[in-house]
Amino acid sequence: MLSNSCRYGIRAVIYLAGQGEGRQVTGIKKISADLNLPAPFLAKILQMLARKKILNSVKGPHGGFSLLKKASEITLAEIISTIDGEEVFTGCIMHNGTCRSIDRNMNPCPIHDDYSGIRAEFIDLVKNRTIDDLIKKANASDEIVI
């Protein structure tokens, strides 16, 4: 459902939030090594988040990334829409384009009625779940891996 880029972005934001909400930056090499993600690909994703004012980006040899907002103010929906676009929330599961629930002029796909409820639950989940919520849940369990 979410692209690799989006999943990597979510993981990186959680990681950065876990570093503290101060202005201390963490370099892309450290982030990528700690999360076992490809550095050049991750750097592009984090730059997207910096352009949308979710992360702070500092250039140079001592540069890196940090949260620009508090973890309690960053929703999963904000990260998802920044990286994967709004189509995640409006796209038809089978066809290119928006879902009939968004565009009433379209005929529904065969799975439309089954998926529309799931879509609504997913949207509600990601709009109401913050990075801080995920950090608290991860810290409360030794079994959750970021």
Image (cartoon, rainbow, N blue to C red):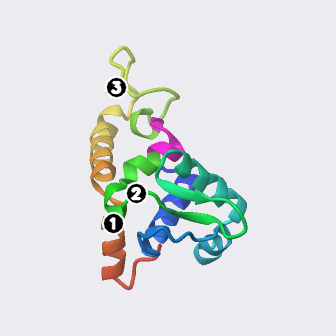
* Magenta: main secondary structure: helix
Give the structural element (helix, strand or loop) at label 3. loop
Q: Nearer the viewer, residue 76 or 109?
A: 76
Q: Which residue is mark 2?
A: 69
Q: Nearer the viewer, residue 90 or 138?
A: 138
* Residue 40 is inside the magenta segment: no
At a point 36% along the width and 61% down the height, the residue shown is 70
Q: Which residue is mark 3?
A: 102
Q: Which residue is mark 1?
A: 132
- Mark 2 or mark 1, which is nearer the start of the sequence? 2
- Residue 40 image point, x, y percent: 72, 59
Residue lying at the far bottom in this picture: please name it: 142
Determine the CA span between mark 3 and mark 1. 30 Å
Determine the CA span between mark 1 and mark 2. 11 Å
Q: Residues within 10 Å of mark 3 (few under 14, many from 20)?
A: few
- Residue 5 image point, x, y percent: 58, 53
| Mark nearer the viewer, 3 or 1 | 1
| Mark nearer the viewer, 1 or 2 | 2
In this rendering, would 28 be left or right of 105?
A: right
Read off the magenta span: 81-87
